[in-house]
Amino acid sequence: MSEETYRPLLQGARALITGVANEHSIAYGCAKVFAELGAELAITYANDKTRGYVEPLARALKAPIFMPLDVTRHEQLDAVFETIAEQWGSLDILVHSIAWAPKEDLQGGLLDSSAAGFGLAMDISCHSFVRMARLAVPLMSNGGSLLAMSYHGAQKVVPNYNLMGPVKAALEACCRYLAYELGPRGIRVHAISPGPLKTRAASGLKDFDLLLGEAAQRAPLGELVDIMDVGITCAYLASPYARRLSGETLYVDGGLNIMA
């Protein structure tokens, strides 16, 4: 067989990974797998507090682009894509792994959530993906993949997930509508729904340790997934092997979602 057969799956691909907070982040799992499979990375960090955790990871992955990105600051979002356009001229993959809600709204029931808190959670966790897609599309003239992180609480009621359930449901709907709108341009869009993972974002959920234990017991495969499992799935979806897939919500949860 020719050497071409053995090229890494994402060799030459350029990927923007948002939402890395530390080495336990889902976004970091994606970045690590993508780098191992030959992709060149642009990695963002949310603020000065997280920079100290993310910068060593970006350096280890040899990411040539490393920038701040608070999605509520439009100038930072514009700057990231302007830098990608200047340094790369194109983009193949975008991973959106950003979710946030005010603690007081997240830990109370949906009925008690404030309009301001709900709106902010929707803006940061959902509409920021739409804003990123709008900026990414001009850089994906040869097609590409947009991937957003969801959770089973978007489809079914998960106790204590509260207002993030409706927010993630909106994110999944956005993925379907963007898949429809961008399909003619060769851009594929997916929502990824990992099982419970020990991430910094998840630590804000009430009784999350109980949720983890129950998930491990109920999943048909009998164990929790990890960030590398999510990264491998995303790499497949971004590769030519998934060229006819778009608009899906794909579960990476050991089969947990099929259980009653």
Image: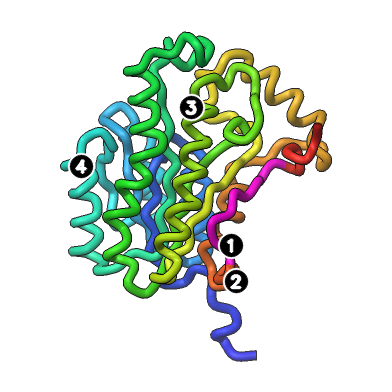
Residue 219 is one of the magenta-drawn residues: no
Image point (47%, 37%), residue name? 170
Sequence-first tag of 1 and 4: 4
**Left or right: residue 80 compared with residue 3:** left
Q: What amino acid does circle 1 point to?
A: Tyr
The residue to which callout 4 is attached is 76
**Amino acid type of the residue that numbered disc 3 sits on in the rendered structure:** Ala
**Mark linked to residue 241:** 2
Would you say the residues marked 2 and 1 are in contact, meaning their CB atoms lie under 8 Å apart?
Answer: yes
Q: Earlier in the sequence, mark 2 or mark 1?
A: 1
How many angstroms separate mark 3 from mark 4 (CA)?
A: 22 Å
**Could you say whether the residue bearing mark 4 is in a helix, strand or loop?**
helix
Q: Earlier in the sequence, mark 3 or mark 4?
A: 4
The image quadrant that residue 247 belongs to is bottom right
Query: Which amino acid type is marked by label 4?
Result: Gln
Cβ atoms at labels 1 and 3 below 8 Å apart: no
What span is in magenta? 245-253
Name the residue tied to disc 1.
Answer: 236
In this picture, residue 193 sits left or right of residue 121: right
Quarter of the view holding residue 222: top right
In the image, what residue occupies the spot 51% across and 29% down? 166
Q: Position of residue 184 (x, y in %)?
A: 42, 70
Locate the N terminus and report the quarter of the image it occupies. bottom right
According to the picture, the residue beneath numbered tag 3 turns out to be: 201
